[in-house]
Image (cartoon, rainbow, N blue to C red):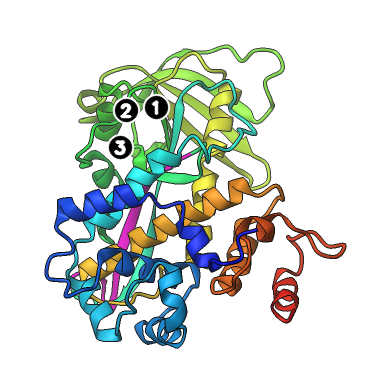
Amino acid sequence: MNTKIPVFKQITKFLDSNIICNLAQDYEINKYNKGLDFTSHLYTMLFSQIGNIQSLRDITNILQSTKRKSIFLGIQRVMSKSSLSNHNANKDWEIFRDIYVQHYYKYSREIRLPRKKLNNIKKKILLVDSSMITLCAALFKWAPYYQAKGAIKLHTFLNYDTFLPELIVIGSGKEPDNHAAINIAVPYPKNTLIVGDKAYSDTKLLRYWDSFGVTFVVRAKAPKYVRSISVRELELPEGTPDSILIDEVMVFDGQHTPKQYPKEIRRVVVYDSEEDRTFDLWTNNFTWTAEEISDIYAARWDIETFFKAVKQNLNIKSFLGTSPNAVMIQVWTSMIAMLLLAIIKKQSKIGWSFSNLVVLLKMLLLNYEDLSDIINRKTGKDPPGKNTEIWVQSRLSL
């Protein structure tokens, strides 16, 4: 029983101090800090994320009111509102990104989830999509989008097995998804399957992915925008679901597309009876069954669930600063918080939903209770997935 350390400190114990110290030295982040170390800045931002605290004043007031506890939270010195604002505006945001990336790869095996489907696909599966975050154009003049609105986009490559991003590119709200995907500075890893919607059915991008040995399954643009010629029709084996309408090999026949993607490409057409519409899918894989191609694309909806989980449970829509640096720090801190929560969720023997787990921990961050006991203990007849807030309130009143 670890009841001498606040819950928040038990959550952040999964952060590797050696990684943080080495990065702090590389970035010289503690230079001119006047006694305020980087770890205090990092933990303050994580406290605001997991606690879903949406203003600088509230963050500093809560921590000031618990000043005696702050050292036990890992915060050596409580920051003032102006100091926190200054750090967010000026401290290099890349260090927060690197903290996430290095910890992600440290824990990636530990947080892997069992595949409910696609067990026959022996590849790393990356689900790609973007999510728009709207901003006030008057305050965020560096992120123009439309009239009085500003916006940024989170271009995300989500690992299907960990339910966490392997890569995020934060760009302008006006930047098309396919441009962001092709302008990524790092090479795509081989033996990877990328799954995307029709925003990524750009023939230049598909050839670019293919050049790295990447397999792709993307939803195609509407047929009226793409000219193609069917080369041969593939036989649908017995037992293929009625939802599979077409399985064929084709080549592009437009003015520019044959040069942009000169190879043969496979086309699978799937009918969705619930939505009463068809999905036209393209892939450069010719060995999987049409049903497997359909199942692969259906898995893409997991990334929509991820964006929903982040926006509903963490502080990523209301920003603590208006500079690009402050926004970047907040986005990457939310990803670090997601990683920590994923580790804790995986260690629980009870089937917590992500949102209920966040509600529970948010209300107990300053409590001196054992984290393992909290996430593994049921009370009464109801499992933790039901009436979580009532359960937490009754625990707090003990």
With respect to residue 326, does 345 lie above or below? above
Q: Which mark is residue 189?
A: 2
Q: Which mark is residue 233?
A: none
Q: Which residues are magenta?
A: 142-159
Three-letter code, disc 3:
Asp
Q: Is residue 194 magenta?
A: no
Name the mark nearer the viewer: 3 or 2: 2
Residue 197 percent coordinates (x, y): 43, 42
Residue under label 1, please give it.
Answer: 192
Residue 321 percent coordinates (x, y): 28, 77
* Residue 50 relative to residue 83: left or right: right
Q: Nearest the camera: 319 or 134?
A: 319
Circles 1 and 2, Cβ within 8 Å, touching? The answer is yes
In this figure, what is the number of numbered marks? 3
Name the mark nearer the viewer: 1 or 3: 1
Three-letter code, disc 2:
Pro
Q: Earlier in the sequence, mark 3 or mark 2?
A: 2
The quadrant where residue 101 appears: top left
Dot 1, how many residues are within 10 Å of its Cα: few (below 14), some (14-19), or many (20+)?
some
Residue under label 3, please give it.
Answer: 202
Distance between the Cα atoms at labels 1 and 2? 6 Å
